Amino acid sequence: MAEATQNIDALMAEERRYPPDPEFAAQANTPADFYDQDPDTFWEREGRERISWFKPFDTLKQWDRPYAKWYLGGKLNVCYNCVDRHVENGQGDKVAYHWEGEPADDRLDITYADLQSRVVRAANGFKQLGIGKGTKVCVYMGMIPEAPVTLLALARLGAPFTFVFGGFSADSLGGRIVDMGCEYLITQDAANRRGTASALKPIADEAMSKSPNLKSCLVVRRTGTEIDMTEGRDQWWHDVVDGQSDDASSCPCEEMDSEDMFFLMYSSGTTGKPKGIVHTTAGYLTGVSTTHHYVFDIKPETVYWCAADIGWITGHSYIVFGPLCNATTSVMYEGLPDFPDKDRWWEIIERYKVNVLYTAPTSIRTHMKWGAEYAERHDLSSLKVLGSVGEPINPEAWVWYRDTIGGGKTPVVDTWWQTETGMIMVTPTPGLTTLKPGSATQPFPGVMAAAYDEQGKAIPAGSGAGYMVIKEPWPAMFRGLYNDDDRFRETYWSRFPDAYLAGDGARVDEDGDFWLMGRIDDVMNVSGHRLSTIEVESALVDHPDVAQAAVVSRSDPTTGQAIVAYVTLRGDQQGSPEKLIELRDHVGKVIGPIAKPANIVFADTLPMTRSGKIMRRLLKDVAENRALGDTTTLADPAVVQEIKARADAEASKED
Ligand code: PRX
């Protein structure tokens, strides 16, 4: 914690304050007493009013720590709430998605009526394949219209799913298919990536070869790339879906229980195997739609853009389910921000007159690096609220975002949350909160957040750093880890018996505002993506030439953190630039390109304690180029000096 504390001291010295603009405040969705409401009354009302129930719930919540249930006894369907009811309410002509493909002029406006037709056709096609209530399905796709359509069609049928980010490897995909027990995979031939086709189906083929329970695979043709189709297993989306009825009554929405499993999202923990985070139906939908409404100040006419990928929790909650439940018009973009040029995002904002942009600090810092001239080419005056998520935002990036993108007037909402929380937990609301660059400010109503000391006591405001915890359940709270109660209890509930341990360090200042300090466990955050050190180590030792590997993160001005690996090779092999590339590629193949180490340092041995544990703390000091910490427990203190000398030599070569 000491190192994080130093950083936070510098951060909290930040003294700029941005009170809400009175004109904005006057029109904001949040009433003046927003933070004074009784949490149960608030969530009861949001649950009743924001959701259309087939059968209303009779009990708000049940808390049998560590398992929560919300809106008990209720029956509903997510697809009905996100699509059908808006068409029934006369909003069929409203645009649900301004979808923008990566190739120039590849655009589609999908209205809520169009979305319903597409979803009903897809659901009928899925049914024909054998997918029904309770069938488990894996989705592996990029940002194409079929991605939200697939999730909504599965929700319509009551089929729980796991959506795997298109950048993950065959092993990662296969591991998730097997762990969840998926019987179907829905994917696409290839995805557009900076002007080239990045194949998905061959990766899916490799994953399927190791997934014995998988019955069938449905493939969207997106790029036209040549791919193999396995007879009897693989079918084209257009063959199965296009000819189906789009009449909503041909495929009614299944009645689901509030607590039926909705989806799993796999996320990295502190051990090698990603964990299946379980989200259920009603609490999740209420949580994401309520936070979406207040945090981004969504109005019926708002044009909203969350520039994440659907493959992450941010995309699930704030590209698909939150915005659609609120009948919002969203932008959805397929490609990368610098294709064909570095002003692509700003061109999109100008074209659709986007009012809300929600992205990650790493993207903001990338745009900063590219320079303001790209944003200055475009009229961004439509922007009213800017959001940030995924990692701590440094004040410099925060102020640049507000000034350069937001014209010096837009509130910036720094939203802290996690895959486990499902919804935004600590955040400003733009009409009420005085903003502080670098602080996520206030818990959302009904979120009982605190920073605990080592003894599990809440640290008083304004006095020191602690463990970020949540003391009471919230609607979108995860309902455990799939098939792993022990790991659930051990990871989140063993450090403090009375609170959920988030895994982040936090400080609460004199005003009660939260400052999140990053992970305090072996989880790294690279460009807002979560990876465990042990997962990357396992991928490295999976290579036949690697004897031992230790992985740590160092800070990086753009990606937040970057991965540094220390590797010893088998026999008397020596490290070389070719070996370095080979190992990086190997990690990319085992986990996915996001996990490739930024640096690899070859060492003859790694620093071990006398009891045989690798001393990652010292390696982190080397990676951060800091004075070495205490080496007294080391079996051979010379080892770390040697590694430092090699790392320094590498760094001077890079310079
Ligand atoms: O360390 C925190 C960081 O991201 C972690 C959660 O990662 P994931 O489950 O992948 O979800 C990311 C998107 C919600 C947290 O434990 N994190 C997320 N948002 C912030 C943040 N750290 C600081 N400030 C934030 N706004």
Image (cartoon, helix red, strand yellow):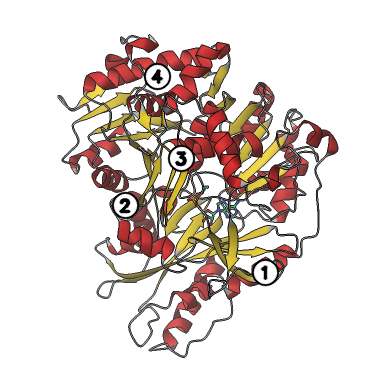
Decide which of tag 2 and tag 3 comes sooner along the chain: 3
* Mark 3 Cα-neighbour bin, 10 Å: few <14, some 14–19, many ≥20: few
Amino acid at the residue labelled 1: Pro
For the C terminus, the quadrant is: bottom right
The relative height of residue 426 versus residue 616 in the rendered view (above or below) is above
**Residue 12: x, y in percent?**
73, 64
For the N terminus, the quadrant is: bottom right
Q: Marks 2 and 1: which is nearer the front?
A: 1
| SS assignment at label 1 | loop
The relative height of residue 268 versus residue 306 in the rendered view (above or below) is below
| Labels 2 and 3 touching (C-beta < 8 A) | no
* Image position of 358 (left or right of 260): right
Amino acid at the residue labelled 4: Val
* Mark 1 Cα-neighbour bin, 10 Å: few <14, some 14–19, many ≥20: some
In the rendered image, which residue does mark 4 sit on? 119
Q: Marks 2 and 3: which is nearer the front?
A: 3
Q: Marks 1 and 4: which is nearer the front?
A: 1
Amino acid at the residue labelled 3: Thr
Q: Marks 1 and 3: which is nearer the front?
A: 3
| Labels 2 and 4 touching (C-beta < 8 A) | no
Quick one: which residue is furthest to the right in this view?
Answer: 22
| SS assignment at label 3 | strand
Distance from disc 2 to disc 4, alpha carbons, whole Å, reads: 34 Å
**Residue 554: x, y in percent?**
53, 65
In the rendered image, which residue does mark 2 sit on? 590
In the rendered image, which residue does mark 1 sit on? 460
Quick one: which residue is furthest to the bottom in this view?
Answer: 632
* Mark 2 Cα-neighbour bin, 10 Å: few <14, some 14–19, many ≥20: many
| SS assignment at label 4 | helix
Decide which of tag 2 and tag 4 comes sooner along the chain: 4
Distance from disc 3 to disc 4, alpha carbons, whole Å, reads: 32 Å
Which disc is residue 59 wearing?
Answer: 3
